Amino acid sequence: MSEKQINPKLVEAIGYFGSFLSCVTFIPQVYLTWESKNVESLSLLMILIVNFSCIVWLTYAYLIKSKPVLVANTIVLTLSLMLLYFKLTF
């Protein structure tokens, strides 16, 4: 019984789509916080965990040379660092 080969371009496209969705999830919160300057409901612990998680994912992506994971986590880390900045300054 032979297994069907999965198209590598399809796999990469799925990776980039997942990366895109991961990035998009933070944009509304960053925008809302920027506009309202209200950080009371932002969890500092959640922001710190996301930042640490992104650093771990970036390390992993670098080691396995996974561009989709690297791109997504660079963007998510940037957005999460913005939320951290807002939390500490607003």
Image (cartoon, rainbow, N blue to C red):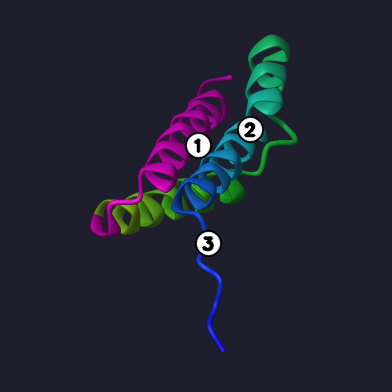
Taking the view exactly as shown, the residue that stands out farthest to the front is 1
Q: Is residue 62 above or below residue 38?
A: below
Which label was assigned to residue 76? 1
Coordinates of residue 5 in the picture (x, y in percent): 50, 66
Give the residue displayed 52% in from the left and 61% down from the top.
6
- Range drawn in magenta: 63-90
Whether the residues at callouts 1 and 2 have beta carbons within 8 Å, the answer is yes
Helix, strand or loop under label 2: loop
Residue highlighted by disc 3: 6
Which label was assigned to residue 84? none
User: Tag 2: residue type?
Assistant: Phe
State which tag comes first along the sequence, 2 or 3. Answer: 3
User: Tag 1: residue type?
Assistant: Val
Whether the residues at callouts 2 and 3 have beta carbons within 8 Å, the answer is no
31 in the magenta segment: no
Q: Nearer the viewer, residue 16 or 55?
A: 16
Q: Nearer the viewer, residue 27 or 50?
A: 27
Helix, strand or loop under label 1: helix
Helix, strand or loop under label 3: loop
The C terminus appears in which quarter of the rendering?
top right
The N terminus appears in which quarter of the rendering?
bottom right
89 in the magenta segment: yes
Mark 3 is surrounded, within 10 Å at the Cα level, by few (under 14), some (14 to 19) or many (20 or more) other residues, namely: few
Residue highlighted by disc 2: 26
- Magenta segment main secondary structure: helix
